[in-house]
Image (cartoon, helix red, strand yellow):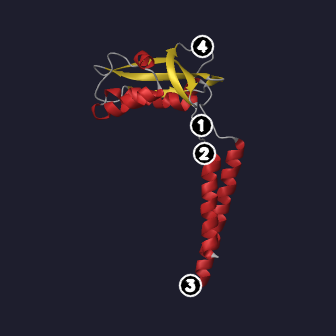
C-alpha cells in the first residue's frame, strides 16, 4: 500500500509538471533571454557564452542597437531590465522593454524600445529594435505581464497539491500504526 501511495504521489507530481509546463518558447521569454545575454557581453568570464546566446536569440544588428558603446565592462551592462507582453501577428511579434544601463564612470542611463521578432524553424528570434508604439508598456508602467498561468493550470496545481498532501497524511498515519 505504501509503495502504491508513493507511486501515486510521484505520478501526480509528474503530471502536474507536464500539465503546467509550456514547451513552446514565448516571444517575451526569448526577448528577456536575449537582453540578459546582451547584458553579459561585458563580463570577462561570461563573454564567450554571452556572445553565443546573444547570437542564438537575436541578430548582431539588434544587439548593437541596445548595448551602449560606453557601457561598463566589468559587470552586467543592464542593472535592470523588464519586458512586457508580446503582441503576436502570425510569425511576427513585438515585445516592449525597458532597460537601465550601467555607464562608464558609475552613471546609469534608462532606455526603452520594442524588440521585433520573427518565428523561424519553430522558434522566435529578435531581428530589430524599434521605438515603442503608443500603448506598448512594461508591467511597471501599467502594461500587462508577459505571461501568466491559465485558470485551469491553477486549479490543477491546487488539486494536485491536495492529492499529494492527502497521500502524505495517509503515509504518516500508517507509519504511526506500524510502529505501535
Q: Which quadrant of the figure contains the N terminus?
A: bottom right
| Spatial CA span between label 3 and label 4 | 68 Å
Q: Identify residue for label 1.
A: 24
Q: Is any atom of residue 109 visible in this view? A: yes
What is the number of the mark on residue 133? 4
Q: Are marks 1 and 2 in contact (CB under 8 Å)?
A: no
Drawn side of residue 40 relative to residue 16, left or right: left
| Spatial CA span between label 4 and label 2 | 31 Å
Dot 3: element: helix
Crowding at mark 2 (Cα within 10 Å: few <14, some 14-19, many 20+): few
* Residue 105 drawn at (x, y percent): 28, 19
Which circle, 3 or 2, is nearer the viewer? Answer: 2
Which circle, 3 or 1, is nearer the viewer? Answer: 1
Q: Which quadrant of the structure image shows residue 102?
A: top left
* Residue 61 drawn at (x, y percent): 43, 16
* Mark earlier in primary sequence (3, 2): 2
Crowding at mark 1 (Cα within 10 Å: few <14, some 14-19, many 20+): few
Amino acid at each position: 500500500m505504501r509503495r502504491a501511495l508513493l507511486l501515486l504521489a510521484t505520478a501526480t507530481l509528474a503530471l502536474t509538471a507536464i500539465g503546467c509546463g509550456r514547451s513552446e518558447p514565448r516571444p517575451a521569454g526569448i526577448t528577456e533571454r536575449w537582453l540578459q545575454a546582451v547584458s553579459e557581453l561585458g563580463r570577462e568570464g561570461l563573454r564567450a557564452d554571452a556572445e553565443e546566446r546573444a547570437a542564438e536569440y537575436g541578430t548582431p544588428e539588434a544587439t548593437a542597437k541596445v548595448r551602449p558603446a560606453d557601457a561598463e565592462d566589468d559587470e552586467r551592462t543592464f542593472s535592470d531590465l523588464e519586458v512586457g507582453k508580446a503582441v503576436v501577428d502570425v510569425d511576427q511579434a513585438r515585445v516592449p522593454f525597458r532597460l537601465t544601463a550601467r555607464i562608464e564612470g558609475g552613471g546609469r542611463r534608462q532606455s526603452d524600445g520594442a524588440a521585433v521578432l520573427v518565428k523561424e524553424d519553430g522558434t522566435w528570434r529578435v531581428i530589430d529594435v524599434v521605438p515603442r508604439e503608443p500603448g506598448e508598456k512594461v508591467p511597471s508602467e501599467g502594461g500587462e505581464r508577459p505571461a501568466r498561468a491559465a485558470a485551469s493550470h491553477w486549479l490543477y496545481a491546487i488539486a494536485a497539491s491536495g492529492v499529494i498532501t492527502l497521500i502524505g497524511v495517509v503515509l504518516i498515519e500508517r507509519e504511526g500504526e506500524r510502529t505501535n
